[in-house]
Structure formats: structure tokens, C-alpha cells
Amino acid sequence: MLLYGFPRLRAHPPAGTMRLTDYTDYSLRVMLYLALRRDGLSTIQEISDAYGISKNHLMKVVQRLGELGWVDTIRGRNGGLRLGPNSLELSVGAVVRQTESDFALVGCFPDEHGERRSCVIEPQCRLKHALAAARDAFLAELDRHTIGELVQPAGELTGLLGLAPITFVPRARAARHAPSREH
């Protein structure tokens, strides 16, 4: 319904109006899944099955995460995916900044191409400053959390994703306790 030439606005926006894209959501999910697996290899199909999301979407996400050096992709019959060497220390904010294409909350903010709409109140507008501060605070909060922190404690999370709990044995101990190959 139009009111004075404008669409009727709701008193309160629906919950979840400010959203990250599915692409960013899936990027974070892949990173978390691989963080739980540590050095073990995973496949896109396993991640797709664990989260119940499209394998095709994940292929695009994994390609980008690989280009960024955050995910190692190993080709071949015994290949798969694993988290890159320093990816546990990545902040969630860093992942969001690389996977979201547009942080222009309103039309007068420059979009990913540097374009913006003009506004008659722009010279005196305080709203844009409040919105910019809110966006910056959002990203600053995400910067406080790393991928590695978000998967701790891992026990319940691995269960929810259908992963067997992984016991980490230091490499030196693992070599001493390895079964003998002699018959």
C-alpha cells in the first residue's frame, strides 16, 4: 500500500534485516568445519552433508578460500581440504571483510564500486555517521574472535556436525606408540 507516494513502512523492521550473505555464512561454516578437523582432510561433500547445504555453493566458497590461502586444497584420489597453516588465527572480521561485497548500509554510502546515491540532507546528516559507527563497531566485535576460538570446546560441536571426536597426540608421542609393522 502506498502512503503519500511511499510504500508503507513497518514500525519495526523484521528480525534479521541486517544480514550477512549466504556466501559469507558458508565461508565461515567451511572454516569452522576444517578447524575442527585440524590436519585431517575433508571433502566438500562431507561439509555439504554436515551442514545440509548445497555442494555447488560450497565449491565456489572453497575456491575463494583457497585463493586467499586460508584453505589448502589437495587434488587427487586421496585429496581433500584442510585449513591453511595460519587460518586458526584469522579473525571472523577478516573473513567477513573478504567475503562480503557491500558494506553500504544506506544509499549515500559508497558501494563496492565506489558509487553512491546523493541525498538532499547529506551536508547536515548525522544519520550516516551513526550508521558508519554501528558498522565499524560490528566489524570490530568480529575482529575480537578468531576461527580457532570459535571451535573451542570442540566436543559438542564435532558431535553436531557428525564428526568423531578427535584426540590429538603430539607427534613425538605418536611415533613412540605407533604399532610395529613387523610380523
Image (cartoon, rainbow, N blue to C red):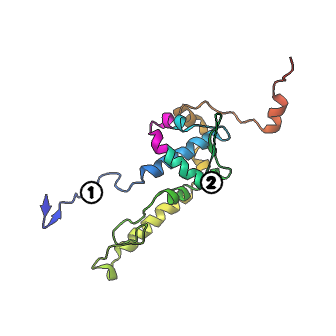
Q: Is residue 127 left or right of residue 31?
A: left
Residue bearing mark 1? 12
SS class of the residue under badge 2?
loop
Compare marks 1 and 2 and give the one earlier in the sequence: 1
Residue bearing mark 2? 69
Magenta span main SS: helix
Q: Residue 67 is drawn in which quadrant? A: bottom right
Q: Is residue 54 magenta?
A: yes
Q: Is residue 56 magenta?
A: yes
Q: Is residue 171 above or below residue 182?
A: below
The magenta-colored residue range is 48-58
> Where's residue 65, x and y in %?
56, 51
Local packing at callout 2 (Cα closer than 10 Å; few below 14, some 14-19, many 20+) is some
Residue 90 got which mark?
none
Residue at x 43% of width, y 66% of height: 112
> Where's residue 87, x and y in %?
63, 51
Residue at x 84% of width, y 23% of height: 181
The quadrant in which the N terminus is found is bottom left
Q: Is residue 107 left or right of residue 30?
A: left
Q: Is residue 19 left or right of residue 29?
A: left
